[in-house]
Structure formats: C-alpha cells, structure tokens
Image (tube, helix red, strand yellow):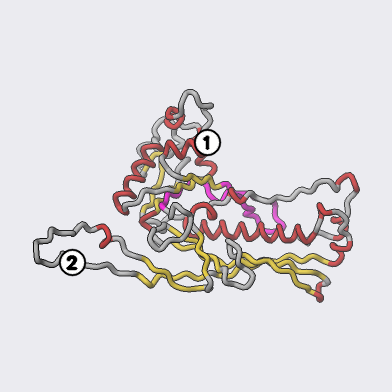
Amino acid sequence: MANPQPSDLYVNQPLTEFAVMYMQNEKNFANTQMFPMVKVKKQGGKYVKYPKGAWFRSDAQLRAPGTESAGGEGYTVDTDSTYYCDLWARHHDVSDEARANFENPVLDPEKAAARFIAAKLALLREQTFIDNFVKTGVWGTDLQGGTSGGGKDFVQWSDYNNSDPITDIDTYRSAMLKATGKEPNRLMIGDDVFRALKNHPDILARMSVSQKRVLTVELLQQIFEIEKIIVAKGVYNTAAQGAADSMAFFVSKTALMCYTNPNDMPSKEEPSAGYRFAWTGYLGANNAEGIRVKKFRMENLSSDRIEGESALDMKVTASDLGTYMYDCIA
C-alpha cells in the first residue's frame, strides 16, 4: 500500500530528530507569479473585454466655432467571455493505528497528510497553468527556435556562435508594443533556458567587469529590459504509482513573454494577457488560492480523512499580449 504502515511510524530514538519530506518551494512554480489572481464569489460567470481597435484610432478633429465636435464611432464591449472554476480534490486517510503509534512531532501523521495534500494541489495548479498557457496555438505569436540557417524564427540560444537572444527579445518586445501599445513586463523561462543564457557570450559581454560575472535573474531583467523574469523550476513525477520515479520539469526549452497588470491585481482599466480565477466564495475556500482543507471521520475505515479541494480556472484574456517561444535551446 502507498500509505505508511503503523510500524513505519515508530522509529528508534536516534532517528526522531529529523524526517525527509519533499516539499517544493512555491517560487519554483510559474503560475503564481505570471498572471494575477481573480477571486470570484461564484463558480462560473462572465467577464468583460474591451476590443482595442476603437481605442487606438486617432480621429479627433478641429472644431470650428459654433459647430459640433467630431463624433460617430464609439466602442463595443464583449460580454461573451466566461470562466468556470472546476473543483479538484485529493484526500489522505490517517488510520487509528497510525495515530496510536505516533510518538514524536516530527512524525505527526495529520500534519504530514495536510502537507501531502497541499503538495498535490500545488502540482495541479502548475499543470493547469502549463495546459492553458504554455503551448502553441494559444497566443498571438508563436516563435520556434532552430539551427543557424534552418529557416526557423530565431537561432537557438544554446548556439553561442550564431544566436542573439538580446536582439531576439528586443525585437519581439517591439512587435508587441506596435500591435498593442503595451510592452511585455513578464518573461517566463525554463530552468534549462536560464542555464544556457548564463553562459551566453553576448549576455556576459553586457555585464560590468566589476561584477562577479555570474548572471542572476535580476541582471538578466536589466539586460532584457523586462520588469520581471520568472525561472520555472517546478518538477513532477511522470511515472505511474508503483513504477520507478521519472522526474521532469514542467517547463523545458520554452519561454513565454507577456504583458500583465503590473500591480499583480485584476483591473477594469488595465489589460492582461491572462488571469487565474479562484472560487473563494466556496464555503471555507476564502484564502488567496481558493483552497480549502477539511478533516472528517471515516468510521468504516477507522480513519480520519484529510481532504483538500481547489476550485480554479485559468484563461487567456488578451492573446495579442503574449508571445510564446519554443525550442529555445537544442
């Protein structure tokens, strides 16, 4: 069985001072850093979108004395866009036997169960983010890297002789500005892409000789002129239960450049490439991520059940405010 057995929870005294528990740092996940969270009271509903065309047309005119001002075209409002927060859940049972064998706070089975459930829900949120945003056919611009002379959109940044990542980012930033009036302020890259950029000669050449010549995220933000760069370091096990572990990054060889509300808050006046919706109106799910954890008795199993739920949705709200780059490195 996957659950700890009662004998597993009783250990010799020298071993009670530590326990190994694999919990990922929340900063490893991109979903909480890339797009603002909208807390909604209802599980589903509509949101308003303002098409940009009328807002960017320069048609104010001179007004002669005694005449009306120029007018005519107004702007439309799109009220057909919807969200729906699907409800996801996972539980872990703490048996009476496990509780009876509990002797040390390090092995508190109830706390361990709650952390186990929290880890599962964190992985769910990151996978939902990947499924909705990190793929082709979603954003206004998809760009593929390739070998030099291979006919792709840009040369892969792991090719230190022929690629030019600084010019690439600058070009794509300018293209978004021209199309939308907004410059991208978020760039998500995989850990493997960041490691390749750390050794790129063009980037190292931009660093001051007084610096330690070690590229940090903060330095890369300055070089790329991007307000915030997120290095996605989240990992997950792709193997089925019972099989040997097969660990992988959620994000690999890819980059996503977007404009989002700089205050990381939903706004009626400010566009955003995407939003995350959390159903905080669900009873007990009033925290920032719309998660609730409850405990109840399963007498038929002689166990207490620790159950976590998360109701969420993630939506592209302005596809032209996103540029997706894939095969960034070989």
- Return the disc, 1 or 2, that comes first in the chain's sequence: 2
| Residue nearer the viewer, 127 or 217 | 217
Q: Position of residue 40 (x, y in %)?
A: 52, 69
Q: In the displayed structure, does residue 315 sit left or right of residue 13?
A: left
Bounds of the magenta segment = 233-259
Amino acid type for the residue under numbered disc 2? Gly
Q: Name the chief secondary structure element in magenta.
A: loop
Q: In the displayed structure, does residue 286 sit left or right of residue 83?
A: right
Q: Position of residue 202 (x, y in %)?
A: 42, 30
Q: Residue at x 56, y 56 (%)?
A: 126
Q: Which residue is mark 2?
A: 71
Q: Position of residue 265 (x, y in %)?
A: 48, 58
From the viewer's perspective, is residue 142 above or below residue 275?
above
Give the SS element for disc 2. loop
Q: Residue at x 9, y 66 (%)?
A: 66
Outermost residue, bottom side = 300
Q: Which residue is mark 1?
A: 216
Q: In the displayed structure, does residue 170 sit left or right of residue 57?
A: right
Q: Residue at x 57, y 68 (%)?
A: 280
Amino acid type for the residue under numbered disc 1? Thr
